[in-house]
Image: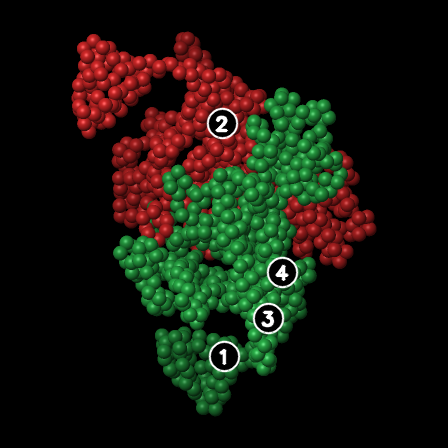
Chain colours: A red, B green
Amino acid sequence: MANERWDDADQIRQKRVAVAEQVKTLKASGGSAEAIAAAVRDLRDLDERLAALTVSDKTNEQDSLKTELDQLLKQRFFVVPSFEIYGGVAGLYDYGPPGTAIKENILSIWRNHFILAEQMLEVSTAVLTLSDVLKTSGHVDRFTDFMVRDTVTGQPYRADKLLEEHIDKMLDDPAMMEGRRAELRAIRAQADAYSQADLHTVLTELEVVASDTGNPISEPFSFNLMFGTPIGPSGKLHGYLRPETAQGIFTNYRRLLEFRGGRMPFAAAQIGLAFRNEIAPRSGLLRVREFQMAEIEHFVHPQRKQHPRFGNVAGQVMNLLPASAQDGNDVVQATKVGDAVRNGVIDNETLAYFMARTQTFLHKIGIDPARLRFRQHKSTEMAHYASDCWDAEIHTSYGWIECVGHADRSCYDLTQHMNHTNIDLRAYETYDAPRTVTTLVANVHKNKLGPKFKKDARAVAETLEEMASGDPERAQALEAELAANGKAMLRIQCKELDVCIERNMVEFTFVTETRSGESYVPSVIEPSFGIGRIVYCLLEHSLSVRNMDEDPRRHVLSLPARVAPVKVSVLPLSNHPDQRAMSTRLTEAFLDAGLSVNEDTSSASIGKRYSRADEIGIPFGVTIDFETPNDQSVTIRERDTMQQIRVSVKECVPLITSLCRHETTWADAFKQYPQFHQ
Amino acid sequence: MANERWDDADQIRQKRVAVAEQVKTLKASGGSAEAIAAAVRDLRDLDERLAALTVSDKTNEQDSLKTELDQLLKQRFFVVPSFEIYGGVAGLYDYGPPGTAIKENILSIWRNHFILAEQMLEVSTAVLTLSDVLKTSGHVDRFTDFMVRDTVTGQPYRADKLLEEHIDKMLDDPAMMEGRRAELRAIRAQADAYSQADLHTVLTELEVVASDTGNPISEPFSFNLMFGTPIGPSGKLHGYLRPETAQGIFTNYRRLLEFRGGRMPFAAAQIGLAFRNEIAPRSGLLRVREFQMAEIEHFVHPQRKQHPRFGNVAGQVMNLLPASAQDGNDVVQATKVGDAVRNGVIDNETLAYFMARTQTFLHKIGIDPARLRFRQHKSTEMAHYASDCWDAEIHTSYGWIECVGHADRSCYDLTQHMNHTNIDLRAYETYDAPRTVTTLVANVHKNKLGPKFKKDARAVAETLEEMASGDPERAQALEAELAANGKAMLRIQCKELDVCIERNMVEFTFVTETRSGESYVPSVIEPSFGIGRIVYCLLEHSLSVRNMDEDPRRHVLSLPARVAPVKVSVLPLSNHPDQRAMSTRLTEAFLDAGLSVNEDTSSASIGKRYSRADEIGIPFGVTIDFETPNDQSVTIRERDTMQQIRVSVKECVPLITSLCRHETTWADAFKQYPQFHQ
């Protein structure tokens, strides 16, 4: 249902772009007033249909689904607020048994899909991070949000969110003119991109006040989003809870390169927790203070970002939304990965390769392909370290949610760490064949400099040597001057000094040498997965309602078997000892086969027990009935189709194991075994 | 080698206990002087042999192994200090690729062995913990170590460690008399158990000074070992990084019980990080500030701690060291689990069941059974919440290391949380048959109390009601006095008040009712695994040296295949295109089979490449040689035996898959396939 809606909306949006283009062409080419008016009418029609669709989506189905999902998540203990019995803390959540199992299953698939299949180096580094490291990475200075306070109560607000809310309220005014509306929308769109000063100006001009009280607000000030804590008893060593797992990989780059025997390119990966001290966490599981990430750092030569397995994904079609297409209508472009790289839409093969692999991963765990797109960051929203970035966004009742970032972090991080630690974090590239290189060299006679320049002699020598490699043209000019006049003036920058150099102190000469390779600082391509967000989106995409018009509505969580928290439920129809014995035997057989199982021996009706299993997404139910002791057979029921087949006890465990490994499809099993009707 | 040594030592220790007993008996029974002298000589002999064994172990083999392991851990990037390029921080470590893989394999085995097989409820709760929760659990007040400072430099020391070091130095004095020696050893043994005042006295009497400078030290003061951090921007909400994962389970107890449909007993489990802000972390991986735990909380009726599967483990033999046997010689008692419970050595079946399951788990991952014991906590060392505790201790070059705690936390935590939140954390037990219960009830006439006692009337009523259920004898006496005298005196404790009660204010009567069950606060049995410590101990137990007398020595890490970080290496003998093609094909086949693989195409000799694989514990090597293109066969080499067999390319992947799943043994494979000799 929801899918069809979204397909509709997308079609209308695409049509709208075509009609808008038509209007433009008509106007430019001097088309008739009638034709123009007709096209504009079409445009308005499409806008109205789009608005209706969006509004109905938002207010009806999706809102109701969101509420029902939130209830289900708590009732069946998927996810609940942490320290619930103490009143909870915004942005902190605990995963109960089904939530934990889904999360762990997704991580296990992630490990196989990325780390094993791509032979990545997995590491597991400290969460507690030395402040020096995060100072270098830029997080201490720039990992901030702007905040304002209610000047009366002191209540803190995130400035961009307060601005957005304020504008939303202003836009509710039906009397507002379209020009003003567009202006406000433009301001709203870049609420999180303003500088501190500009933000102050905007907040003042729009007369933004504290939303809870209507009191005046303070000037915006920046608030660092990292949790800080002293390390050890001295109080002198300061640390932060890491805001991303990536820095633990960068600081180990030298060890990783050694582990690889110096061979480039390669990728390292890490699954672990990260923390952000959000000012005002909202949106449930989507903006939290503690979250699990799975990050990959692929190290590659900055000029050679081809990928050896790019051919495997080049034909894959992805929904791309490049920065240039983000005009408010945001029409995605279904593009083959190969074409996207060839046309320069995606910058390089490695970035594109990972985007394609991410798409396959998300499909594999059950994300609806129609509600997945890849959106390129606009230059204003790029993180301080990134040179290009594409987010995998998943559509939910909260709108489009960023779930996986794909950033080209260039050589920013390694360069920073190298500069701050003086430790060589470069890789070495051996040329295919040795290369002959000619360079200008300063041949400095230090014994002539010493007597004349005394304590400045070393600075003079260094200036001359640096000039030879850094500014050969100027060095050649100096050489010419020395040859002509026997002396020349030289500026010693670091000493703010001008000195007179003589002929016998230095000669600049060209030297030709053969090199077998060169050192370089690698670029980093980073796919970064927010696991909690993916779990939430997956749950929303998987939830449907069986009996729309009844009360209570029956919910089904159609998770792929590989992700389902429990693989099979075992349901004896009665308490008869023979049935209970078979139930125990089957349960143990499933456990031995490594399948999680839920033996439901409660006295509830079989329909109610199926329903409870459907709600937490158990794909298969094995029912032991009064015939079982006689025919040594059981009934297997599939969750989504509710179809049932009769299978011998002996075949039951191997069949369900095969179904859970996705080696057999239900359709095949349904054909192979006799159907069962209650 | 090391095993035999330890077996020897144990035998000598056991003999020593017998001889000491003999000496005692001889003296008590007035045995001949000669017989006593002979027995005492035997005793001295045994002591000397024991000392020699211990010293040689400590100074030679083990110390050298420790150094070599530490080097190997860094060189092959198992584990390195975090932020190494920034100089590191004591107590924080990063796991590199082989370390991470071993850790994850152990966790995966743990999940199957406990969570899946025992059908536990796995949860994943927040690391950042609200201070209120840890105040309730006792950690804010009691999770502390005593600390002293150098009064001149301010350098902090852990008081107990400083005391121990100081005593060790004193004991170095050869002139010291045995009586004084014993005294000092007794003090040293309880260095971490002194109260603040007693510790101050001891430090002063022994004239303990700062070990680095010889300066005087401050009085001991307590230092909380939790990392604290403010949550959110207000600065008012305070949190800590959790010091154990258990509290996340306790605070969710109500949700868990609901998830179980109210059925008891059950166990919940959690794998996750915990943090302790150690004052002065030492001993490498054994005392760290951030560590992975795997904890189980088994909730059970406090009077019924039987376990339904106890029969499965009752015959298992364990090395037990009860508190009563910890006399300095510490001779373990090899005991059947069933006997230990029957004889009251282990308090109850559930605690014993988990100890036995832990032992099986540790054997499964490769811990040497001869270097594993279960030591009971003495009453002085028990945590504030525990009523009985057994540690699984593993012997390493650092001595016996506590790796898994098994604590009976009684109903401490749930009771505390219930009292502080007023939320009912009790389970309900339905009796097999309804029970008739007679209780004394206070029938209070509040309309008579009000006029007389005014604002104290409520306290009087409550005192009477509480007396009926809490102290029925006293209530009956009061009833008798009222019947006889028409009035009686009553103490109102909470008001520190004595009042006169009259006959018409209350009657105490017996009421008989039928109850179908009762509520109770469950007890908790907690097995708690320190994963990092287990990894370290396992690495030490697995490491051996192939060529003792050569340099460099060749190290082999004999990890079970299920734990090994990489399952197979693929080694083409030359760079010939046919061999390289086969190498790529086999590598992909192993990856498809889900086995981690290391394709080593370097130009190093095959011996050197085997050696590199042995060092990180890769159990199987597949060598592609000049014959392979002709006979479509490869050589499989086993790491520990260095035996080689010739196997067809087709059979190679299934055979190694089966070996890695421990479905086939190497001995069987070696018999089945032709041997290969280089």
Question: In the rendered structure, which amino acid carries the disc numbered 3?
Answer: Val
Tag shown at residue B471 = 1
Q: Point out the residue furthest to the bottom here.
A: B484
Tag shown at residue A264 = 2
Residue pictured at 36% horizontal, 35% vertical? A421
- Distance, label 3 to label 2, CA atoms, is 66 Å
Tag shown at residue B318 = 4
* Discs 3 and 2 share one subunit: no
- Distance, label 1 to label 2, CA atoms, is 79 Å
Tag shown at residue B19 = 3
* Discs 4 and 1 share one subunit: yes
> What secondary structure is marked by label 4?
strand
Question: In the rendered structure, which amino acid carries the disc numbered 1?
Answer: Asp
**Where residue B194 sits: x, y (%)?**
40, 66
- Distance, label 1 to label 3, CA atoms, is 55 Å
**The quadrant where residue A646 appears:** top right
- Distance, label 4 to label 1, CA atoms, is 46 Å
Q: Chain of mark 4?
A: B
Q: Check if mark 4's residue and mark 1's residue have beta carbons within 8 Å.
A: no
Quick check: can you spot residue A278? no
Between circles 4 and 1, the one closer to the viewer is 4
N-terminal of the two: label 1 or label 3? 3
Q: Is A578 or A586 nearer to us in this picture?
A: A586
The answer to whether B350 appears left or right of A429 in the picture is right
Q: Check if mark 3's residue and mark 2's residue have beta carbons within 8 Å.
A: no
> What secondary structure is marked by label 1?
loop
* Discs 4 and 2 share one subunit: no
Q: Is A355 or A374 nearer to us in this picture?
A: A355
